[in-house]
Image (spheres, rainbow, N blue to C red):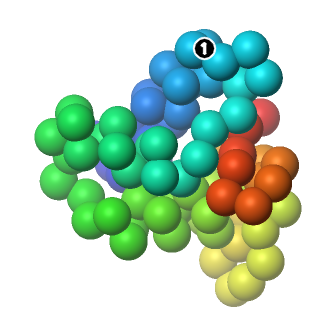
Amino acid sequence: MTCRDEILTVARKLSRERTDGIFTAQEIVTAMRERGTRHLDTTIRRHVATEMCINAVGPKAGKYHDLERVGRGQFRLL
């Protein structure tokens, strides 16, 4: 399973558990660790904050339109 696939699985679960659907990058990392992911924390954070985030900035920003940053370190699924 790719890092992105694992993040999406965990993000969907976290979104369902909250009325506002908002979660943090740290919650994603923690949940993936609990599931026994093989991905490094830095890789997970980079995917969440940059590659998967539609409103991120940088060379690889918004590669996938999966998440939206709604606050400092806070995200929601699109």
Left or right of residue 33, residue 48 in this image:
right
Residue under the image location 71 percent in, 25 percent down = 21
Q: What x and y, as percent, mark residue 10?
A: 44, 31
SS of the residue under disc 1: helix
Residue 54 in view of the camera: no
Residue 46 in view of the camera: yes
Q: Is residue 25 above or below residue 15?
A: below
Q: Quadrant of residue 41?
A: bottom left
Residue under the image location 25 percent in, 58 percent down = 39
Q: What x and y, as percent, mark residue 14?
A: 53, 25
Q: Amino acid at mark 1?
A: Arg
Which one is nearer the viewer's eye here, 62 or 29?
29
Residue under the image location 62 percent in, 38 percent down = 23
Q: Is residue 73 above or below residue 14?
A: below
Left or right of residue 34, residue 66 in this image:
right
Residue under the image location 24 percent in, 45 percent down = 33
Q: Quadrant of the C terminus?
A: top right
Neighbor class of circle 1 (other Cα within 10 Å; few <14, some 14-19, many 20+) is few
Q: Quadrant of residue 35?
A: top left
- Give the labeled residue for mark 1: 16
